[in-house]
Image: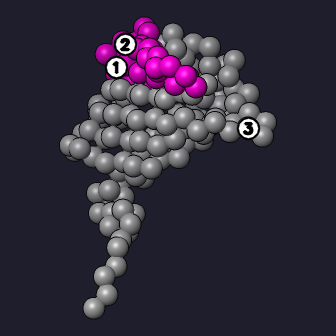
């Protein structure tokens, strides 16, 4: 009798597949807005009381953490996105799961490319279904210098 180890991808349930499909659709929509310089559209993906947690890891010393809480702070984060359209963004979603029927957790890497250099920025999102849309409750993004 042989034993076989299955990867997480091989044992995904239909519910997990639906979560991955939705996560890819949502994150792809965000990267398209970024490419178009649509800061207002990016900010509109968030609940009014949402937050962005930005963790920066330096080569030495402890990481620094910035919190951007609430609609005004989040709109400010995205107000200059037009200046960043020189970067090519793609999302590599590693994990997505419905923790409740109206709450989706997504994690992966944001790949930010300029010329031949690509940075991999780990992210985690929690989204909540609000009406017909999935709004971001919290985004945690890890940056490294």
Image point 41% across, 21% down: which residue?
53
Residue that sits furthest to the left in the current view: 100
Q: Is residue 136 magenta?
A: no
Q: Main secondary structure of the magenta part?
A: strand
Spatial CA distance of label 3 from label 1 is 31 Å
How busy is the neighbourhood of tag 1: few (under 14 within 10 Å), some, or many (20 plus)? many
The answer to whether residue 107 of the structure is visible from this angle is yes
- Which of these two is toward me, 41 or 108? 108
> Residue 117, labelled with which disc?
3
Kindly check if marks 3 and 2 are in contact, taking CB atoms under 8 A apart as contact. Answer: no
Q: Position of residue 101 (x, y in %)?
A: 22, 44
The answer to whether residue 43 of the structure is visible from this angle is no
Residue that sits furthest to the front in the current view: 60
> Residue 50, labelled with which disc?
1
Q: Which residues are magenta?
A: 45-74
How busy is the neighbourhood of tag 2: few (under 14 within 10 Å), some, or many (20 plus)? some
**Quadrant housing residue 116:** top right
Query: Where is mark 2, residue-wise?
Result: 69
Q: Position of residue 8 (x, y in %)?
A: 36, 62
Image point 40% across, 35% down: which residue?
124
Spatial CA distance of label 3 from label 2 is 31 Å
Image point 26% across, 38% down: which residue?
103
């Amino acid at each position: 009798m042989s034993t076989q180890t299955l990867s997480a991808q091989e044992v995904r349930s239909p519910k997990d597949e639906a979560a991955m499909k939705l996560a890819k659709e949502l994150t792809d929509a965000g990267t398209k807005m970024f490419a178009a310089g649509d800061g207002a559209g990016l900010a509109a993906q968030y609940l009014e009381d949402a937050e962005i947690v930005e963790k920066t890891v330096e080569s030495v010393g402890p990481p620094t953490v910035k919190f951007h809480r609430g609609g005004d702070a989040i709109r400010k984060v995205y107000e200059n996105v037009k200046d960043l359209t020189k970067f090519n963004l793609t999302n590599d979603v590693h994990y997505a799961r419905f923790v409740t029927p109206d709450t989706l957790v997504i994690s992966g890497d944001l790949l930010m490319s300029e010329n031949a250099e690509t940075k991999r920025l780990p992210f985690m999102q929690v989204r909540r279904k609000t009406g017909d849309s999935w709004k971001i409750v919290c985004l945690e993004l890890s940056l490294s210098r």
